[in-house]
């Protein structure tokens, strides 16, 4: 049992270190590496919780797609001409702190509200179970998420069209 | 002697021993494969250009690449003055993580597999996307315009070709009904999936050539315009790590293609490992052949080909496969 605890603590430390690196570093590319570390830490937590499918999806989507996209955006339009720390100012920090605290309290409330029952027998969630849940009980939220993505795509296209029009 | 080994195995646990032995085997395959492929590439290049290629060191020049790797090992590690030090050192190491992780799930034979994970194909796809991250870090850390341009190209190319790569493997997962690579191979007992899914195979192969940054899609390291692309500033052993990773990636994409489309380790008479390596090296030869026959494509052609042709076709293929399987 102690061995499992040690692994859990190591994973948590990796995740936290990555998160801190993301927000504290002045250089944007180091922040990106911190983000990747955090994503790997979260994937490690999924594996710890016996959900390898979710862990692989975490790496595939967040590390493989989203971080690479962020990296691409940094390289194409990022503040390369400015030195690190020049493009940030105190107001940004205050706003970020308010948002972070708000979401922290929200999550904390949800977590405290939930009833945690410890199962007597450990079980593994298979890919089949997840698929069944997504297309059966959770179809509505699942579809709502895709609506959100569609809105985001339309927004991105609009933004790029608008900035092209200015030129 | 034997008893002590059995005792040790019993104490540590079979899984741990299997993993350790498997990883050592993986290292041997990685190094041996890279040395063989450097020789093969030079030989193939030579014969395609009506030359002979290396012939002085050893029979048919076979030991040439050993001599080269010893030379690379002996070279001084130069670090240019203005590089971003942590990133510069991190990149060559990081490029090896996906390479080693992918080897863990590939079934070389019915039992020759380090670990059969029930989400095996997802492991491969998830970790192979890390390669682009290390290329990016290398390009950024080198503090050189050629490296950075090479890295940006690599990222754009990888985003574009990752999608058809994933979509071309999905129909196979539909047909095999499993994410485990061994189940996929077992499902091809009767007829190889390449006969059911020729379109998916072509898409996968084209996309994997792009993912490994090989000609005709080698824009990240286009010699004629970018010196050597993202690894311009690397020398000695650090350079050879990139080199090793490239040749290992060639082997990996061919091995995945064999596992998914060409029946994996299955074949008559000869043992499975022999079949597996034979099929894989035939595909690797095709990759080498590509390099010395096709000219490099232009960057807009490269991106258009993925977004306008490969992705719609693979979606269509997925739709048709799903429809037929449900009927």
Image (cartoon, rainbow, N blue to C red):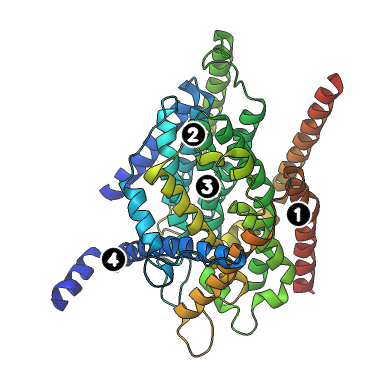
Q: Chain of mark 4?
A: B
**Cα distance, mark 2 to mark 3?**
14 Å
- Nearest to viewer (mark 4 / mark 1): 1
**Cα distance, mark 4 to mark 1?**
43 Å
User: B300 or B157: which is nearer to us?
Assistant: B300
- First reached walking from the N terminus: tag 4 or tag 3: 4
Residue bearing the label numbered 3:
B131
**Cα distance, mark 1 to mark 3?**
22 Å
Q: Residue A1 location, x and y as percent? A: 28, 51
Do tag 1 and tag 3 residues touch (Cβ < 8 Å)? Answer: no
Marks 2 and 3 share the same chain: no
Q: Residues within 10 Å of mark 4 (few under 14, many from 20)?
A: some
**On the rendered structure, is B169 left or right of B134?**
right
Which disc is residue B311 wearing? 1
Q: Residues within 10 Å of mark 2 (few under 14, many from 20)?
A: many
**On the rendered structure, is B127 left or right of B307?**
left
For the residue labelled by badge 3, is the local secondary structure a helix, a strand or a loop?
Answer: helix
- First reached walking from the N terminus: tag 4 or tag 1: 4
- Nearest to viewer (mark 1 / mark 3): 3
Q: Residue at x 64, y 53 (%)?
A: B210
Q: Quadrant of residue B271?
A: bottom left
* A123 w.r.t. A60: above or below: below
Which disc is residue A88 wearing? none
**Cα distance, mark 4 to mark 3?**
28 Å
Q: Chain of mark 1?
A: B
**Cα distance, mark 1 to mark 2?**
29 Å
Q: Residue at x 75, y 73 (%)?
A: B325
**On the rendered structure, is B298 left or right of A44?**
right
- First reached walking from the N terminus: tag 1 or tag 3: 3
Residue bearing the label numbered 2:
A33
Q: Residues within 10 Å of mark 3 (few under 14, many from 20)?
A: many
């Amino acid at each position: 049992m102690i061995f499992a605890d040690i692994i859990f603590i190591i994973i948590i430390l990796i995740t936290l270190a990555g998160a801190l690196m993301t927000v504290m570093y002045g250089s944007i590319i180091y922040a990106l590496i911190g983000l990747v570390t955090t994503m790997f830490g979260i994937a490690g937590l999924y594996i710890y919780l016996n959900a390898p499918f979710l862990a692989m999806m975490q790496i595939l989507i967040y590390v493989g797609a989203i971080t690479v996209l962020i990296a691409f955006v940094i390289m194409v339009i990022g503040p390369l001409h400015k030195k690190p720390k020049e493009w940030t100012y105190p107001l940004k920090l205050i706003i970020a702190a308010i948002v972070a605290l708000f979401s922290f309290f929200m999550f904390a409330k949800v977590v405290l509200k939930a009833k945690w029952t410890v199962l007597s027998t450990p079980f593994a969630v298979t890919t089949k179970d997840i698929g069944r849940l997504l297309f059966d009980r959770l179809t509505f939220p699942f579809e709502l998420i895709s609506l959100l993505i569609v809105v985001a795509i339309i927004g991105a296209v609009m933004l790029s069209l608008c900035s092209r029009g200015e030129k | 002697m034997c008893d002590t080994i059995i005792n040790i195995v019993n104490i540590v646990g079979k899984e741990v021993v299997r993993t350790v032995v498997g990883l050592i085997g993986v290292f041997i395959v990685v190094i041996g494969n890279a040395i063989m492929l450097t020789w093969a590439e030079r030989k193939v290049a030579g014969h395609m250009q009506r030359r002979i290629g290396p012939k002085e060191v050893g029979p048919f020049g076979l030991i040439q690449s050993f001599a080269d790797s010893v030379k690379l090992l002996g070279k001084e590690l130069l670090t240019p003055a203005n590089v971003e030090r942590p990133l510069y050192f991190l990149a060559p190491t990081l490029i090896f993580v996906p390479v080693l992780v992918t080897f863990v799930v590939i079934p070389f034979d019915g039992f020759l597999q380090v670990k059969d994970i029930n989400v095996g194909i997802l492991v491969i796809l998830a970790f192979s996307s890390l390669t682009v991250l290390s290329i990016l870090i290398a390009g950024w850390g080198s503090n050189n315009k050629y490296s950075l341009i090479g890295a940006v190209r690599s990222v754009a190319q990888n985003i574009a070709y990752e999608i058809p790569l994933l979509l071309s493997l999905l129909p196979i997962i539909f047909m095999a009904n499993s994410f485990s690579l061994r189940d996929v191979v077992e499902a091809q007992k009767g007829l190889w999936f390449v006969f059911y899914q020729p379109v998916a195979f072509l898409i996968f192969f084209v996309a994997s050539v792009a993912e490994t940054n090989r000609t005709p899609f080698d824009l990240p390291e286009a010699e004629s315009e970018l010196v050597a692309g993202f690894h311009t500033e690397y020398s000695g052993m650090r350079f050879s790590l990139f080199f090793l990773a490239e040749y290992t990636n060639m082997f990996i994409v061919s091995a995945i293609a064999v596992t998914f489309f060409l029946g994996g380790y299955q074949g008559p008479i000869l043992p499975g490992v022999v079949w597996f390596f034979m099929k894989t090296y035939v595909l690797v030869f095709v990759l080498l052949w590509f390099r010395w026959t096709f000219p490099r494509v232009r960057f807009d052609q490269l991106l258009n080909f993925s977004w306008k042709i490969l992705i719609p076709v693979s979606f269509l293929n997925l739709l048709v496969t799903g429809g037929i399987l449900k009927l």
